[in-house]
Image (cartoon, helix red, strand yellow):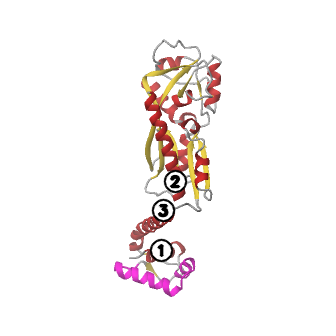
Amino acid sequence: MTIAQLRAFLAACDLGSFTAAARELEISQASMSELISRLEEELGLPLFVRGGRRLILTSAADELLPHARGAVSAFQNGFNAVRSISALEGGVCTFGVLRNASYYDLSDLVERFHTRYPNVKVRMVGLNSALVAEAVASGELEAGLVVLPISEPGLHIRPLLRDEVLYVSAARDPDSGPATIEELTRNKLVLYDAYAGWRDSTRRQLLERARRHGLSLDPDIEVEHVETALRLVASGTVNTIVARSVLESPSCPEGLTAAPFAEPLHDTLALIRRESTALSPATQKIVEFAEQSLRDRSRRLRRRA
């Protein structure tokens, strides 16, 4: 059984005739028939019912079809990967990043990748983690970086960095100790990522914690960007929650008090891709760039901790 035979088989399945399949593969109809006949001989079973206007798949063909697709796809992915070892001279990279990627040393990710591989087209989408997960699961994006947890099935998840989430206020006494979920729910609260709402990964953790304690969580203000939320907190009227990396950035407003939660809360950043699907060479390279940035960031966070 050869890759050429499997390609011929797949083309016949998809196009419904040997003539159309031969045209698609740019071979003669005689060569096409020969490839299918040899494959049937090796299997000892017919793959098509011939004679009608369109080929009909036999039960043997139905069984072979998913394995043939996997084998041809694996072969093509391996071929592409070997060709890309020296340099990427084309292709498209599709990658999703969490909205606050710039706080994790990822703001220049595209610039670094494009400098190294100038002939590769890049499509990088910055969205809330829940939306990145949906785009990867649907095939719109090949891979992405998200904050866990996510709900989309069929994804391979590799955690890379854990960042503590803190309670942030302008009016709280710095010496009052760790924050509690009860304190969070009884004070005025602003939350960001308004579009994603309670699908947002950090919000989901908060909501689950509040429910475990029999509490309701209802923000007074919802905005889209964490920077807007922090400016509102700096005015002294509301409080929020934010990851340590965001709070320690140079752009964070002054005069804020941050406290860890008595029951620690963390954002876990992870790389996701579809299960049983190999990444294209271009996307694999940008994944490697992102992984290295997050590993470096994780080491710095551990040293500070």
Helix, strand or loop at label 3? It is helix
Query: What residue is disc 3 on?
Result: 81
Query: What residue is disc 1 on?
Result: 7
The residues bearing labels 1 and 2 have C-alpha atoms spaced at a distance of 28 Å
Residue at the bottom extreme? 30
Q: Which residues are magenta?
A: 18-46
Q: Residue 258, percent across and down?
A: 52, 20
Type of the residue with mark 2: Lys
Is 6 placed above or below 285 here?
A: below
The residues bearing labels 1 and 3 have C-alpha atoms spaced at a distance of 19 Å
| Residue 118 in view of the camera | yes
Q: Earlier in the sequence, mark 1 or mark 3?
A: 1
Q: Earlier in the sequence, mark 3 or mark 2?
A: 3
Task: Give the label on residue 285, or none.
Answer: 2
Depth check, front residue: 140 or 305: 305
Q: Residue 156, percent across and down?
A: 44, 49
Q: Residue 112, percent across and down?
A: 59, 48
Type of the residue with mark 3: Ala
- The label nearer to you, 1 versus 3, is 3
Q: Determine whether label 3 and label 2 are within 8 Å by CB.
A: no
Depth check, front residue: 294 or 61: 294
Type of the residue with mark 1: Arg
140 in magenta: no
Quadrant showing the N terminus: bottom left
Depth check, front residue: 162 or 139: 162
